[in-house]
Amino acid sequence: MKSNTNTKLIFFHPSIHTKQNNNNGVSLSSHRLWFIFFLSFFTLAFTLTLINSTLPTHHLHSSAAAAAAFSSSAPLPPSVADALLHYASLANSSAAGAASGGHMSSAEVESIAAALRHCSPACNFLIFGLTHESLLWQALNHNGCSVFLDESEFLVSRFEQSHPGIEAYDVQYTTKVKDFPELLSAAKSQVKDECRPVQNLLFSDCKLGINDLPNHIYQVPWDVILVDGPRGYFPAAPGRMSAIFTAGVLSRSKKGGGVSKTHVFVHDFGREVERIFSDEFLCPENLVETVDSLGHFLLETMEIQRFQFCANSTASFSNSPSSSGNEDDDDVDVV
């Protein structure tokens, strides 16, 4: 038998198997490491997301509130900014308070501010007269309803244009200071009819009643009323007779709201007309305090069957109006 001499033997060197095995091992190990890394990363991310979603919301709100409280970029309410600028300009234009006639004293301002705080956070505040303090009243009651009334249509228009968002109306007064004795006598004679203490002045023909304001003014339950206008320091001026009478009726006819009492302030309380009409229609028994030239009354609502403003009517007056105090103390043009 002839043997095949072409037969070849193939030998595999051990080092070849070792190298291939090593290469496969390194590749598999590398893949496992990457897989473990990505698995760990996504596990950590999922865990953090789960923890954040289960945190109590009040912690998040507290953090947000704290950030807002300390944020210097939070803007001031426009009314507060206007007031700060207004009084800063006044301070710069007057030296140590000189020649600053028409301003209320700090004690008078604090008395009114205290009444506004009493009905905080939102008061219904009615103000007769546009004065240096008007922007301050708006700022102190920026969460509430503040309405300004003034005898000057021009001042009202300029004030609203300079400070958008402020509600102000002009009032056409038909009274004069020199006629106050006749006006008072007529009102007292009609106290059970047109000039009664509880009524809707919108439908009243009482000479002292202001009946030409927008309808909603008579429906608002006013918490604070300030009489600091119109002018009343000379005989031909409109005087504050109608403003005081109207404040007394609005307070006693108050409906709705959570507080049945109304704070009524009368500025220049030392003058004869202001004193007499306050005694007659706001009443001495309701006088809480006098602060400098400011009278502070606290009036309660009345039943509709009542026909007397006060427990006792003791009004007395001379034949001519008194102009005690500085004639420039009221109705100063606002900025």
Image (cartoon, grey):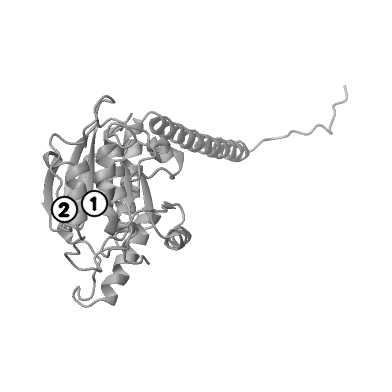
Tell me what residue is drawn at x 32 percent, y 71 percent.
Answer: 89
Tell me what residue is drawn at x 21 percent, y 33 percent.
Answer: 308
Residue 236 seen: yes
Check residue 171 in the rendering and tell me which mark sits there, or answer none. none
Please state which amino acid type lies under the numbered disc 1: Pro
Q: Secondary structure at mark 1?
A: helix
Q: Residues within 10 Å of mark 1 (few under 14, many from 20)?
A: some
On screen, 326 above or below 23?
below
Calculate the distance from the C-alpha at mark 1 to the C-alpha at mark 2. 8 Å
Tell me what residue is drawn at x 29 percent, y 71 percent.
Answer: 90
Q: Which residue is mark 2?
A: 317
Image-quadrant location for residue 81: bottom left
Q: Which residue is mark 1?
A: 181
Residue 290 screen position, x and y as percent:
12, 51
On screen, 115 above or below 47?
below
Residue 103 screen position, x and y as percent:
24, 64
**Viewer-proximal residue among 245 and 7:** 245
